[in-house]
Image: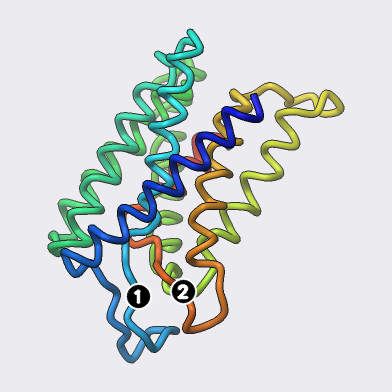
Amino acid sequence: MIWTYVIIAAILLIAELMYFKIADHFNIIDKPNERSSHSTIVLRGGGIIFSLSMIVWAVMMVVQGNDIVPYLPFLCGLVMICGISFWDDIHSLPDSVRMVVQIVSTLLMFWSIGLCAAFDNWVWMVVVAAVALFFCVGATNIINFMDGINGITAAYAFAMLLPMLLLDSSSKFQVSGFIESSYLVVAIIGVLVFSIFNFRPKGKAKCFAGDVESVGIIKEIGYGY
């Protein structure tokens, strides 16, 4: 299995380098302004590697003969939100459009994890979904706002994904096995690849995550959580 992860890491690294050429060609950049913590032009959208890592993971699961049907609503929502966010990185979209897609993708995530199905009373189901939706969409936009600081996107991703992998893989905890461990491992590999180009001293970052994956990574973490 270790060699499978090595191959995935190599694929994601190549994909990231290819994206840099695309971003440079289409001028997908983050120009500093008076509110920025960086002072140089940085490529934007490098966090596309997060959603690509989930697509690679899904392909790996299918090749190994595993059932990914329960994950499909989440994966569809992830591709949807990353697609619209990537377009917003290139051409600014109205806030209303992005908000609608964020809500729909989050509801698809809830469907995939069976959040609403856990309640027999439809009133409680609506209340829980509404509260969870509020916090998920809010967290998504807070993380997006913080993306311009070198390493912060990778840091909070590691701070959530690593403990979740520990909980999931250790028999010492009653909550072990709550998700496919390979999902978390591949997500961490994606963050590691991104960190190579982002987790650097001030002024040295090659790329920022951009809207495309500031919102994508919170969906990945949220699904695992």
How far apart marks 1 and 2 lie (CA) works out to 7 Å
Residue type at tag 2: Ala
In the rendered image, the residue lying farthest to the right is 172
Image spot of residue 83 (x, y percent): 23, 45
The part of the image, by quadrant, that contains residue 104 is top left
Residue shown at 48% from the left, 26% from the top: 115
Q: Nearer the viewer, residue 94 or 211?
A: 211
198 sits left or right of 25 in the view: right
Q: Quadrant of the N terminus?
A: top right
The answer to whether the residues at label 1 and label 2 have Cβ atoms under 8 Å apart is yes
In the rendered image, the residue lying farthest to the bottom is 34
Crowdedness near tag 2: few (<14), some (14–19) or many (≥20) residues, C-alpha within 10 Å: many
Residue shown at 74% from the left, 28% from the top: 169
Crowdedness near tag 1: few (<14), some (14–19) or many (≥20) residues, C-alpha within 10 Å: many
Residue shown at 73% from the left, 26% from the top: 175
Image spot of residue 49 (x, y percent): 40, 48
44 sits left or right of 91 in the view: right
Image position of 203 with respect to 113: above or below? below
Q: Which residue is mark 2?
A: 205
Image spot of residue 180 (x, y percent): 59, 23
Residue shown at 42% from the left, 30% from the top: 110
The part of the image, by quadrant, that contains residue 88 is bottom left
Q: Nearer the viewer, residue 100 or 36?
A: 36
* Element type at mark 1: strand
> Nearer the N terminus, badge 1 or badge 2?
1
* Element type at mark 2: loop
Q: Nearer the viewer, residue 114 or 198?
A: 198
Q: Which residue is mark 1?
A: 42
| Circle on res. 81 | none
107 sits left or right of 124 in the view: left
Residue type at tag 1: Val
